[in-house]
Image: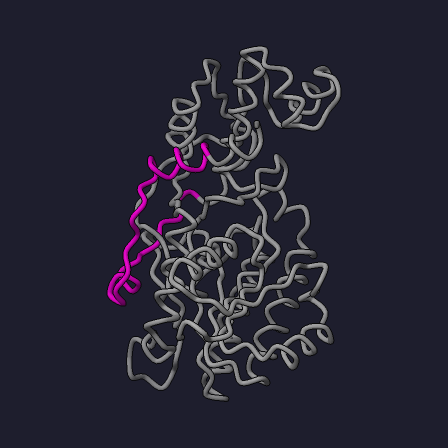
């Protein structure tokens, strides 16, 4: 890419896309194309075809996706597989038809088997059963990897797939039902602190209710009270977290410096596992994560782990040696990142 290349970022308003936009702009890229969902429904084949014919982007970051936490994934299974398949199929196919020079497809490390050896190497893909709660989403993302590989092999395209670990950062989703674990913990513990300190005006502003009784009733559904915060599971599962701006920097680095051929690890006749893990290679238990957030926020109540609720996969640690060998490594530690995201959250929700 050069600084005047036309770059389309699909999903620019989300956690991933907004970080990509910021990174590209900081690096001096001036010709960035975006569309809101209202302007362009990526699940609509006709609309996507018209967009590519009209705009003719040279480079594409495919960060648009339907995403959510364990509850949302398990509840809206049909929505997750259908919408994600439609979005990626439309964008990848139109990128091929319209001569896109390079495309970066963003997936998730949930593509790996539930009981994959740790840390998870790219070669572990499709070696065992997936975690049930997010199986539809994972299958859609695996299909995206294979679509990119197949177009590269048949048509000579330059489509690269990257699989980020759990991301967090500015513009994250803090919805109590649909958010991932780290932003969910931040909001729940923050609201519990506000209740504990009788800062009711801030609670009402944060939740959108008119009376504190209504807010309390709503928050109790998610295990939030002035004295405690309920967390699903035992707290023993371990997770890896990556600051979204680090993820964006890795993606732009790959687009600038690496091609599909660089992701092929051997000279066998079968080209597999060309995707690239993006992460830190470091993990923390949910219990330790929750306590880190509790200490940072200053909540005086208890954290209650509901062992009747599912834990999900016990470990999800990525092997990032492939990415490191390609020349990139993360820079923001988890402790630093939690401070950054809490500051961002309170600035954008309490003032």
Residue stretch in magenta: 314-343
Task: Give yes or no for residue 319 being in the magenta stretch.
Answer: yes
The residue at 47%/81% (across/down) is 101
Left or right: 341, with 217 as reference point: left
Q: Quadrant of the N terminus?
A: bottom left
Q: Position of residue 203 (x, y in %)?
A: 63, 21
The residue at 33%/42% (across/down) is 283
The residue at 72%/59% (across/down) is 38
Which residue reaches farthest bottom? 155
Q: How many numbered circles does the render carry?
A: 0
Task: Give yes or no for residue 74 being in the magenta stretch.
Answer: no
Q: Position of residue 227 (x, y in %)?
A: 54, 13
Relative to 2, does residue 284 appear above or below in the rendering? Answer: above
The residue at 30%/75% (across/down) is 265
Q: Position of residue 141 (x, y in %)?
A: 53, 63
Q: Position of residue 226 (x, y in %)?
A: 57, 14
The answer to which of 271 and 101 lies nearer the viewer is: 101
The answer to which of 279 and 38 lies nearer the viewer is: 38
Relative to 280, does residue 334 appear above or below in the rendering? Answer: above
Left or right: 17, with 330 as reference point: right
Relative to 172, does residue 339 appear above or below in the rendering? Answer: above
């Amino acid at each position: 890419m050069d600084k005047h290349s036309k770059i389309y970022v699909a999903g620019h308003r989300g956690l991933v896309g907004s970080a990509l936009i910021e990174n590209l702009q900081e690096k001096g890229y001036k010709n960035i194309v975006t569309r809101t969902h209202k302007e362009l429904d990526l699940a609509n084949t006709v609309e996507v075809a018209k967009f590519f014919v009209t705009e003719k982007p040279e480079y594409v970051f495919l960060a648009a996706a339907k995403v959510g936490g364990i509850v949302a994934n398990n509840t809206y299974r049909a929505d997750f597989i259908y919408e994600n398949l439609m979005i990626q199929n439309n964008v990848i196919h139109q990128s091929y038809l319209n001569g896109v020079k390079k495309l970066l497809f963003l997936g998730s490390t949930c593509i790996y088997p539930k009981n994959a050896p740790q840390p998870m190497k790219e070669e572990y893909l499709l070696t065992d059963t997936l975690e049930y709660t997010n199986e539809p989403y994972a299958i859609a993302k695996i299909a995206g990897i294979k679509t990119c590989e197949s177009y590269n092999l048949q048509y000579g395209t330059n489509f690269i797939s990257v699989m980020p670990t759990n991301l967090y950062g500015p513009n994250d989703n803090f919805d109590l039902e649909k958010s991932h674990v780290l932003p969910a913990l931040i909001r729940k513990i923050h609201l519990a602190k506000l209740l504990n300190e009788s800062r009711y005006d801030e609670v009402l502003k944060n939740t959108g209710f008119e009376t504190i009784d209504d807010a309390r009733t709503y928050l109790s559904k998610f295990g939030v009270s002035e004295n405690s915060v309920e967390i699903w599971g035992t707290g023993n599962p371990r997770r890896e977290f990556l600051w979204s701006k680090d993820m964006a920097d890795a993606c732009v680095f790959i687009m600038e410096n690496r091609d599909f051929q660089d992701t092929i690890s051997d000279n066998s006749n079968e080209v597999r596992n060309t995707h690239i893990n993006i992460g830190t290679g470091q993990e923390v238990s949910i219990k330790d994560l929750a306590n880190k957030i509790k200490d940072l926020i200053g909540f005086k109540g208890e954290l209650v782990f509901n062992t009747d609720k599912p834990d999900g996969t016990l470990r999800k640690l990525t092997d990032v040696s492939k990415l490191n060998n390609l020349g990139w490594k993360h820079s923001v530690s988890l402790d630093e990142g939690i401070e950054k995201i809490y500051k961002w959250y309170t600035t954008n929700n309490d003032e």
